[in-house]
Amino acid sequence: MRFLIQRVTKASCEVEGTVTGSIGKGFLVFIGIADSDTEETADRMIRKMSHLRIFDDSEGRTNLSLEDTKGDLLLISQFTLYADCRKGNRPSFFRAGEPKHAEALYEYILRKCAGLIPGGRTGHGIFGAVMEISLVNDGPFTILLDSEELGMH
């Protein structure tokens, strides 16, 4: 499982002219799911994400988490996080999860993150839809969490 986390001052997702999610200060998280991922993997990734200390404290140090700041979350499914560009110029997505499995885990993540941060809003995209994402990256600050690299499998 891969979470590409962008610290934002605001972000939104639009599908066919309708806003499906909109947030203020917090994390825009693009979520890639592989067939080997489980609900346990998702739980560990959510815990890691929500505890990342990448918001500034009163002294300007990145020492506060999403929980500390009561930040918002916008969660977007993104199978292209598993793009393999080693051969040729057309990416292969063979490592991305089979759609039924990936959608079920994405929906699980949405349920687990709803209300995760008391006082924070949680928005989302639509699995498999063509989405238009708007964001203002704060910093810019972008972190890639990969469950394989973190030993979560």
Image: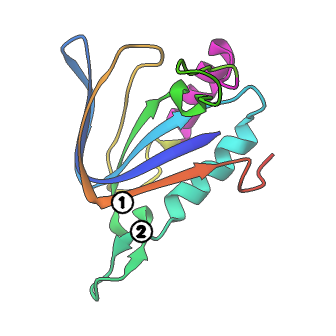
State yes or no: residue 34 in magenta: no
Other residues around mark 2 within 10 Å, as few (<14) / some (14–19) / many (≥20): some
Left or right: residue 105 versus residue 111 is: right
Along the line of sight, which residue is nearer the eye, 36 or 112?
36
In which quadrant of the rendered image does the C terminus lie?
top right
The residue that appears at 28% across and 89% down in the rendered structure is 59
Q: Residue furthest bottom?
A: 59
Please, what secondary structure does the residue beneath circle 2 have?
loop
Q: Are marks 1 and 2 in contact (CB under 8 Å)?
A: yes
Quadrant of residue 133 within the rendered picture: top left
Count of all numbered marks drawn on residues in the image? 2
Q: Which residues are magenta?
A: 95-112
Q: Position of residue 90 (x, y in %)?
A: 54, 17
Quadrant of residue 76 within the rendered picture: top left
Magenta residues, dominant SS class: helix
Q: Is residue 3 above or below residue 119?
A: above
Q: Position of residue 65 (x, y in %)?
A: 44, 68
Left or right: residue 150 versus residue 74 is: right
Other residues around mark 1 within 10 Å, as few (<14) / some (14–19) / many (≥20): few
Q: Earlier in the sequence, mark 1 or mark 2?
A: 2
Residue, disc 1 = 141
Residue, disc 2 = 54
Q: Is residue 58 above or below residue 125?
A: below
* Amino acid identity at mark 2: Ile
